Amino acid sequence: MLEELVKQALIGTGRATAEAMPLDGALGQAIGSLRAGSPEATLLQRAVICAAYERCGRKPITVALQLERSAVDKQLECSARASQVLDLLLMSSDTRFNQQLVAEWFGYSVAANRRVPHRLLPRVLDFASTHRALRDAITPAIDARGEWLMKCNPRWQFAAAVNDDFDSIWHTGNRDQRLSVIRQRRQVDPAHTRGLIESTWQEDAAEDRAAFIESFSVGLSPDDEALLEAALDDKSKRVRAAAAELLTALPLSGFVRRMTERAAALLKFVPAEPGRLLKLKKSRPATIEVTLPPEPFDKTWARDGIVEKPAETMGIRQWWLLQIVSYVPPAVWTTQWNIAPEECIGAIGEFGDVLIRAWQLAARRCADQSWLRQLALAAAAKGTEKFDATLLAQMIPAHQLEVITLIADSPRTELETVSKILGASHCELDQRCTLAVVDKIEYHLSSPTATYQYQLTQLLQNLVLRMPPQMHDELAKRWADQKWESNRKSLDEFFQVLVLRRDMKREFSR
Amino acid sequence: MAGGWTVDRVLQLAPDPASAKAGQGLASTRKWVSIASDSGAIWGECQGSGAKPYQVQIELFEPAFKCSCPSRKFPCKHAVGLMLLFAADEIKPAARPAWVEEWLASRADRAKKKQEKADEPAKPVDAEAQAKRRAKRLDRVGEGIASLKTWTEDLIRSGIATAPSQGYAFFDEPARRMIDAQAPGAARMIRDLGSIAMSGAGWQEPFLRQLASLHLLTSAFDQMQRLSKETVDDILATAGIPQSQEEVVDRPGILDCWQILAQEIELEDRLRVQRTWLFGSATARPAMVLHFAHGAGPLDASLQPGTAFDGEVCFFGANQIRAAVKNKTSTKARANLGGFASLDAACAAFGQLLARQPWLDEVAVPLQSVVPVRIDDQWRLLDEQKQSMQLTCTDSSAWLLMALSGGEPIDVAAAIDGSRLRPLAAMANDEYISLGITNNVGV
């Protein structure tokens, strides 16, 4: 009916005359009772009546549908303040903190066995679909209602959405996609993953090959040796270096055996000799005697990743020494000489600096915790200024904390150094360590020249996510003074994040 | 949560995103020298950049805000921060200090004076002069409306097929003429007509409906002398001849327990328009209260969605849904969204309203025990009789409804326009959730 009127209206009553509308029922009656008028008025009046008729009489329609219901949630909903905090985090566009804070929120909620309130589920699932790394942490807290929603919305089916045709991704994907295949498959089926890499080795670009080799650092096993050993013969220097690094972490590999043989001839441990009073002989501390590698450069070394020409200003034979020792797992020395790492470090003499650097590299390559700890402590004791923060990355959290506390405690340490080591580490800070950093900040602020400083902002950003949140109240009291005037903005941001952390921890521990 | 105040709700009060953000920055007890509340008010002293802290106070019933800071935004960031702390249950009860007592007393005083003034016999109005002014204005509107009638009929005579290619200017010109003729309601209808023409595929039928509706206004205006007082009110309201709020609340109102179903805020240029949807529990009467604010000015905060109040509401016409609150005698913390037991009943009620007032656009209704479902890429609501209607809303609102329901019936407040439902809010597990998402704030 209205359709017919629309047709007439489109053409215009000037061109086509409105036809009589044969209609019965109420609508027909209403239209029939219209007074005769111009064709234009008649059309518009009819349209008004039809439209009103339609809108007044709209009926819902019956649908046959088997309703799928969500199962009952197994957990209790989190507290009102806890969901308020999550609400704020999901709303915010501040990416510097959010991901970590959301992860922390879910850490607490899962530990406390509390679920997300229903009203936040869509936003939580949206967040999980864009932050892959957090999915596993989030999943337990969405409970039955969340799982039901995931089933309803294809966009949230991230678990099932993963394409499992790894072979075809491997052959057609870009580097990131192919790397993600290695990451996903390496734990499940390492042999298959190696097979994939070998299948395209000849065609792949050097950068891709290096990236694939580097990705082996996760889940490295003796089974990888053959492929890594073959990579030592690669055309690309970067591929060769990557393979050598990883082989160092395989203590039973041929590579390590060859390097150990080379190095054994260079280092000799001479135990301490106690002095003898009667023979008037002075006591002598233990030392490591170093014999520099002989010239000329041994061509077989090059194959194992050793570079002939120094990359920095240093003697050529010292350069070779540095490289050879850096490819020997440090545990080799402690076993061979039957002494502790700190005794080795204490026994350095001539070329000591070279040895320390070589050991640092080797300890990082093997992630040797006792060596890393002793090397870091020794480096921190020697001077915090030149401390190589990269040592921390592979250390277990407890050791990191020990080293950070030591450095922050030292009165000679600059604010910038503290900021740098916090940035390079990833452990949670305890109260003791936090107070050391806090003292450092206060000392810095008390200096008459302290103004707005980028390092301070950075340090606060590093501190706020890792310090114990319950220290909020104490710090809020301590840092309420005028000293903060020129750094007000950084401090406000610091407390905004800290109060959220304090509250989520408190809410979930009730 | 404190007195039904949630973060969302507090942030909605903020006059702009900057204030919302700044308010969040102040929602930490660290910023406050003192902070406390009692049953009727919250107050605090906030350390700003000056030496003396700002005194911030909020009267909770209205709510009303006062702050000693120089900001012209209202409520200012300090009040927003204080409200957020209140919503987070961070404020402990205490006895009122003198400065709060003083303010509340002066407010009560003013309210009393206002009441006294209202109770005084009204000044005798010069009825004759008023009628003269009104007649003059109606003449002017009448002239404009007459020209509009010609315009609509011309359009139909030459055919509407070319309307989309005419551009907005084609509609702006008659709309401006209606503004000059003091009929802004008609002007808005013409502008909407233009938007429909430009809306792309499927514009034809809605265009004809809107054009016919305009034409109906012009014909009705011609015949006003023969029509009932109620219908004349509808015609004048549709044309946009204003009635003052005071004049409206002077009339006898309708006593009921009014459920505050939902609130929407729209931005029209620099003007913020707040629409609050009410529904009378006993009378089953829908109502809509409008409030306006320019720029960062304050919007009314006295009607909190998800609550209900006993009181009197006055309408702008017997068939109009636009209304004003005359008084509130008591408030209830929880609204009851469970109004219509079936979609059919809701449709029938809408039909009744439309039959009396043909220019009715949409009204909000409470729907009891409905389930949101997705059928063939369409969002629908399903009632207990397995009857369903299509929803018109964003996907994120629909998913929120799904999350709240989990396939089980929930109570929903929705706007109905005779073809579809636009969901506004839901009540699940005794919690009121607005479907309008405030997305403009950050930590």
Image (spheres, grey):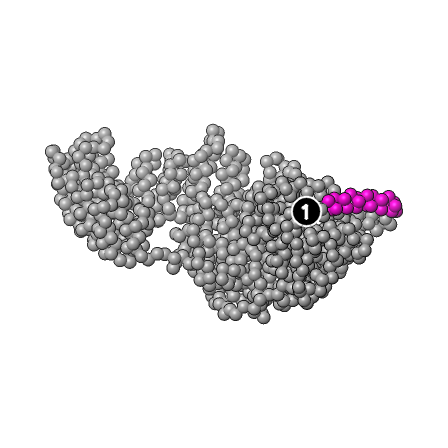
- In this view, the residue in front, B193 or A207, is B193
Question: x and y percent of residue A52 in the render?
Answer: 67, 59
Q: Residue at x 25, y 43 (%)?
A: A205
Where does the image place residue A389, in percent across and percent down from the top left?
33, 40
Compare residues B210 and B274 and report the one nearer the observer.
B210
Would you identify the image quadrant in which residue B372 lies? bottom right
Within 10 Å of disc 1 (Cα), the crowding (few <14, some 14-19, many 20+) is some
- Please state the chain letter of the residue tagged with numbered disc 1 in the rendered image: B
Question: Residue B180 vs residue A459: left or right?
Answer: right
Q: Residue at x 48, y 33 (%)?
A: A452
- Seen in the picture, residue A162 relative to B131 is either above or below; the reply is below
Q: Which residues are magenta?
A: B124-147
Tell me which residue sits at (64%, 50%) in the image: A15
Residue B145 is inside the magenta segment = yes
Residue A286 visible to an observer of this rendering: no
Element under disc 1: helix
Q: Residue visible at 22% across and 48% down?
A: A201
Q: Nearer the viewer, residue B226 or B300?
A: B226
Residue B56 occupies quadrant: top right
**Where does the image place residue A73, in percent across and percent down from the top left?**
48, 65
Name the residue carrying label 1: B154
Which kind of residue does numbered mark 1 sit on?
A: Asp
Q: Is residue A138 left or right of residue B177?
A: left
Residue B155 image point, x, y percent: 66, 47
Tell me if A323 is positioned left or right of B47 in this view. left
Numbered circles on residues, count:
1
- Above or below: residue A265 compared with residue B375: above
* Residue A497 falls within the magenta-colored stretch: no
Quarter holding the N terminus of chain A is bottom right
